[in-house]
Image (cartoon, rainbow, N blue to C red):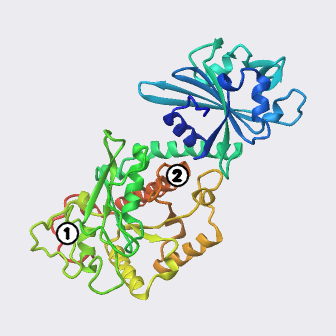
Amino acid sequence: MEVTTRLTWNDENHLRKLLGNVSLSLLYKSSVHGGSIEDMVQRCSHQGYTITMTYINENMIVAFVLGNYINLRESSTEPNDSLWFSLQKKNDTTEIETLFLNTAPKIIDKQLVCRLSENDIFIIGPDNKIYLDRMMIKNLKLRFYGHLQFLECEVFRVEGTKYNLDYTKRIMKAREHRNKLLADIRAYKPYADLVSEIRILLVGPVGSGKSSFFNSVKSVFHGHVTGQAIVGSDTTSITERYRIYSVKDGKNGKSLPFMLCDTMGLDGAEGAGLCMDDIPYILKGCIPDRYQFNPRKPITPEHSTFITSPSLKDRIHCVAYVLDINSIDNLSSKMLAKFKQVHKEVLNCGVAHVALLTKVDDCSEILQDNFLNLSRSMTSQRQVMNVHKMLGIPISSILMVGNYASDLELDPMNDILILSALRQMLRAADDFLEDLPLEETGAIERVLQPCI
């Protein structure tokens, strides 16, 4: 007979996010394999990392993660840290609280007992009763105290090549830092309130990840992977219209104080890809949303949708040169020449700029332990130096991300890179706004001539 878990698909999904996209394999179910603690230990020993789930009721689960069930015997002297967490369902949402302890349960008098400073803080008895003390209740934000009958106890093996408690600690710290970055960007206001929204232009070769970066930013703020902007292949540009995307803080949230402007991809071939003569007009805000690019014919002031008197809010405030980190060495001389031509126009207009290297393979290896700086591998460091020499961009302005192109779930490490890159672009835009001549901070009369 197949043994099935009480864990719902939604609960398991929350656990995978908490522990780092691991998979779970059911080892023990008290109603099937026997309710004694010895029965539990016998089935779960020598299984590596495990999660013990205690179902208090239909809406509340208390659980802990251990390194090895064999260490639960009272005679074991091996140190055993543990991660504790609660899942509580409230109004169609699931709330998770976590707690790390440098102690773990032991079998004492046929009970599973966790002690801290000689005090019993957690007990599972053979009569399907659970006990948690006030410290555990407070930290896990539970709505009961003392002894309580539970419905079921299950133990799962945690399967994942990277998994250990240190990895989970890193994931949880990453999630905290990700939330801080989210809060910072939500609270951001452009310099001196000169504009209400910063416009960031994404420019790069076909297939470099421009549209995917917008999708990734939107995904982080919506809490799940999205795909509003259609993504092409490495050789065929899907983006043929100029798009000015706003990003909302959640599905029904307010618009955030920035816009991402997506362009047709650059192409090394003549008469293909984004027309170089369109670049100055894009930078000055003369091209409207959804303008249809023509690789062979740039927009002119006579075009019916041409914006003849753009204001500061219509202009581009920061340019991000988007490059696939794996393809930098293979840029053709013609593509490099187009990049330098775009960069010349950007410099002429005095617009802030950064480089965005996409398609980073392992985001966790890029981030230092404090998540504040990038720990560049030899390969990524070489690519950073290549871009620095190619475009003269300061190394501190060369950013790296792993876009959500084929992923099904968000990763807090990747979220940090995406949000850090976005924050750096906003800071660069602030520098541009602060440096503007006083006469340019108001309405701009006409900008039909090239930038000076």
**In the rendered view, would you say 43 is above or below 122?**
below
Give the percent coordinates (x, y) of residue 233: 38, 70
Mark 2 vs mark 1: in front: 1
User: Is 246 placed left or right of 376 in the picture?
Assistant: left
Q: Which residue corresponds to the image point at 79% horizontal and 40% vertical from the top-left? A: 46
On the question of residue 104 being in view, the answer is: no
Image quarter hosting the N terminus: top right
As helix, strand or loop, the secondary structure at mark 2 comes to: helix
On the question of residue 135 being in view, the answer is: yes
Give the percent coordinates (x, y) of residue 200: 35, 61
Q: Which mark is residue 416?
A: 2
The image quarter containing residue 422 is bottom left
| Callout 2–callout 1 Cβ contact below 8 Å | no
The image quarter containing residue 28 is top right
Give the percent coordinates (x, y) of residue 307: 15, 65
Q: Which mark is residue 292?
A: 1
Determine the residue located farthest toward the front in the rendered image.
Answer: 1
**Amino acid type shown at disc 2:** Ile
**In the rendered view, would you say 287 is above or below 386?**
above
Please state which of residues 56 and 81 is positioned toward the viewer in this rendering: 56
As helix, strand or loop, the secondary structure at mark 1 comes to: loop
User: Is 444 placed left or right of 356 in the picture?
Assistant: left
**Amino acid type shown at disc 1:** Gln
Q: Residues within 10 Å of mark 1 (few under 14, many from 20)?
A: some
User: Is 272 placed left or right of 94 in the picture?
Assistant: left
Q: Which residue corresponds to the image point at 61% horizontal and 32% vertical from the top-left? A: 3
